[in-house]
Image (cartoon, helix red, strand yellow):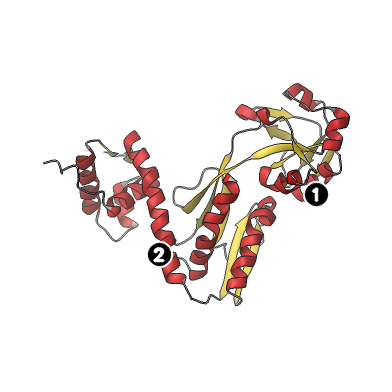
Amino acid sequence: MALPPESPLHFEALTALSAVAKLGSVQAAAEASSQSAAKLHRLLRTQEQRLGVALVITSVRGSTLTAAGERLRDYADTLIHAATDADTSARQEHRKLNGTLRLQAPQALMEPLLMPLVLRLQEQHPALKICLLADEYPIRIESDAPAHLRLMRGPLPTSAYARPLGDLRVGLFASPRYLDKTGRPGSLQSLARHALIHCSSEGQAPVWRLAEDYPLRFEPRLTISTSAAALRAAIEGAGVVCCYQLEARRACERGLLEPVAEPLWSAGHPLALTYTLGIRAPASVMAFLELATPWLRTQLFG
């Protein structure tokens, strides 16, 4: 018999829905939790009866969410993150942290995104040591120990615990002085005729993937191995650089750079903080997540 419409959504059912979507089956979700597969099935079926719509389709290959299930999962993930943040805040309040926290991220994102957070966290917890590792140079510290947290771009592993942050935009920038002299490109053809600065920090060929994933292959006038140096070259008038919008934001605000050919920019790439062990992670990991998640979301949407 269907439940009355005023019957509430259960947080356990939302958690189950999110886990099934992440792990691919009710059985895998049960194994990752302290609940049985039968109980998770009951929770999901109860919510389907209440809503009058199927949420999960199960077959011999596993379980997938219906369109309605995917929409509900988006709300579920938001609620789960909020509940985790509240739990973290309650558990970490007035707690002193020590030991070592290892963070890994693309080198270009360390200065604009991670460094302000690291300094704030160490100000709150002077005994806490922090090691920052670049994706491009993954040198292990302290007995080959892996990073506790990673700032990751693009699709995430299905098994990862993650805090989605927003979309990371890549754009084109040049100095006003350079553009006043050479003109402002408005098409791929005119852009290809400009002096283009290639950042080879990740060993990539000189190819920019622009709108609709169109690859612009070019002969760079200048090739530099770090994004910070490539950005400095653009500020000095060497040409057009392709970099994260976050990296160029401060220079644009000061009038040292300006966006170039914005209609040609590609869509943003999803960015997330991933971490190990879930809620069993060390206290320093949970403290960093509590501090970092709202601030990073503000930076990406700002």
The reply, left or right, for residue 11 in relation to residue 182 is left
Q: Is residue 137 visible?
A: no
Depth check, front residue: 215 or 6: 6
Earlier-in-chain disc, 1 versus 2: 2
Q: Is residue 128 visible?
A: yes
Q: Residues within 10 Å of mark 1 (few under 14, many from 20)?
A: few
Q: Can you say whether 204 is above or below 114 in the image?
A: above
Q: Residues within 10 Å of mark 2 (few under 14, many from 20)?
A: some
What numbered label is drawn on residue 10?
none
Q: Quadrant of residue 132?
A: bottom right
Depth check, front residue: 259 or 40: 259
- Dot 2 lies on which element? helix
Disc nearest the viewer among 1 and 2: 2
- Write the residue at 78% across / 30% down: 218
What numbered label is drawn on residue 87?
2
- Dot 1 lies on which element? helix
**Residue at the extreme right:** 181
Could you tell me how far apart the alpha carbons at marks 1 and 2 are, in whole angstroms? Answer: 42 Å
Image location (x, y in percent) of residue 14: 31, 49
Image location (x, y in percent) of residue 39: 22, 53
The reply, left or right, for residue 263 in relation to residue 230 is left
Q: Are marks 1 and 2 in contact (CB under 8 Å)?
A: no
| Kind of residue indicated by mark 1 | Ala
Image location (x, y in percent) of residue 191: 77, 27
- Image quarter hosting the N terminus: top left
Residue topped by disc 1: 229
- Write the residue at 50% across / 62% down: 290
- Write the residue at 42% across / 69% down: 90
The reply, left or right, for residue 196 in relation to residue 85 is right
**Residue at the extreme front:** 254
| Kind of residue indicated by mark 2 | Asp
